[in-house]
Image (cartoon, helix red, strand yellow):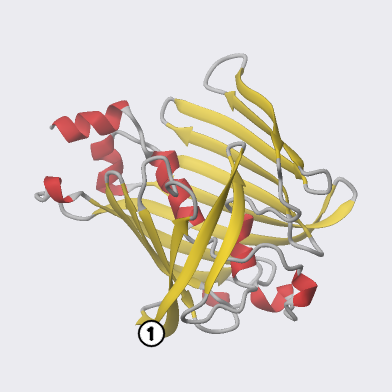
Amino acid sequence: MIPLQRWKRRPQGHRIIAALVLIFSSANLYPALEKQGKSLGVVFPAGETLVYDIRWGAPAWIFFLPTMSAGEITFTFQGETDYKGKPALRMTADAISSGFFSSVAGITVADSFESFVSARQFCSLQISKKIREGKRQRDILLTFDSSNGTGHYLDQDVSRHPPVELKNQAVQNIPDCVQDLLSAIYYTRTQDLRVGNSVRMAISDNGTVKNVEIKVDKREMVDSPKGQLPALRTEATSVFGGLFRSGGTLLVWVSDDDRRLPLKFEAKIKLGKVFGTIKTIGNTNKGPNGAP
């Protein structure tokens, strides 16, 4: 029972969700989209919704525990919008815990993410995170001004009344075109990924910028709601230091076609592994699996 008590004292929900988001971010961030020769509407149409089943596998030293259902995560490309008077694109993600893992770990996760990017260059303008994990309730806002190489990070504990400001600080050395955890997923799908390629990216989260290298190592067949599809397996590693404070490795399989759909993923973290498989490829404007 010691491991279970440890989970209850130190919830890992947000770190797991961050891992699930980051494993999709396998793009070279710097070329502008107009240089890619792709139409955003073709790659991910407005309303596209991808839903994943999340499972957790115990580390080897807890060999007696089976793989458990942990919940689901939903990514939605909301489409065109306005951000402070400029054309932008908006995308959201929602992570909800459920199943035996949630009850055993004593964690109820209901996290939401919202990202805005410039419509022309697809550079991140802002990401907001609402973290709701039991008693841990945080509102986080990260904004970017790439033209001046700066950003701003605000973190508030909203479990208290009034909310308590935990961090309110400037972020320096922002690249010309930076991505946040969520926008990087979609930028990835505009890239020309090929087996043997290795690309680097910079991503900003929690007031820091980290360089990540992505390797496309093989082509495999992967199950999906539309049957087996050819996919490219990618692995993300940090160029300097660990990818996360707790270490770990990240694999993601994206469809080897124009859509570059993330089909499944595997994240090796400090406490075991997190697995995800796509269960719905839908559109809020049309219905499940794109049906009217």
- Pick the front one: 208 or 182: 208
Q: Position of residue 170 (x, y in %)?
A: 71, 31
Q: Outermost residue, front direction? A: 240
Q: Outermost residue, top direction? A: 161
Q: Outermost residue, right direction? A: 85
The residue at which mark 1 appears reads as: 228
* Quadrant of res 191: bottom right
Residue 284 is at least partly visible in this image? no
Count of picture labels:
1
Amino acid bearing label 1: Gln
x 66%, y 36%: residue: 141
Is 15 placed left or right of 45 in the picture?
Answer: left
Q: Can you say whether 166 is above or below 99 in the image?
A: above
Q: Can you say whether 72 is above or below 232 in the image?
A: above
Q: Position of residue 273 (x, y in %)?
A: 29, 53
Task: Kindly state the secondary structure of the residue where label 1 is placed.
Answer: loop
x 56%, y 53%: residue: 211
Q: Quadrant of the C terminus?
A: bottom right
x 76%, y 68%: residue: 32
x 29%, y 33%: residue: 106
Is 60 placed left or right of 80 in the picture?
Answer: left
* Quadrant of res 120: bottom right
Is 89 placed left or right of 239 in the picture?
Answer: right
- Pick the front one: 123 or 42: 123
Residue 67 is at least partly visible in this image? yes
Q: Can you say whether 243 is above or below 143 in the image?
A: below
Q: Position of residue 187 (x, y in %)?
A: 64, 65
Is 210 placed left or right of 63 in the picture?
Answer: right
- Pick the front one: 86 or 153: 153
Q: Position of residue 196 (x, y in %)?
A: 47, 79
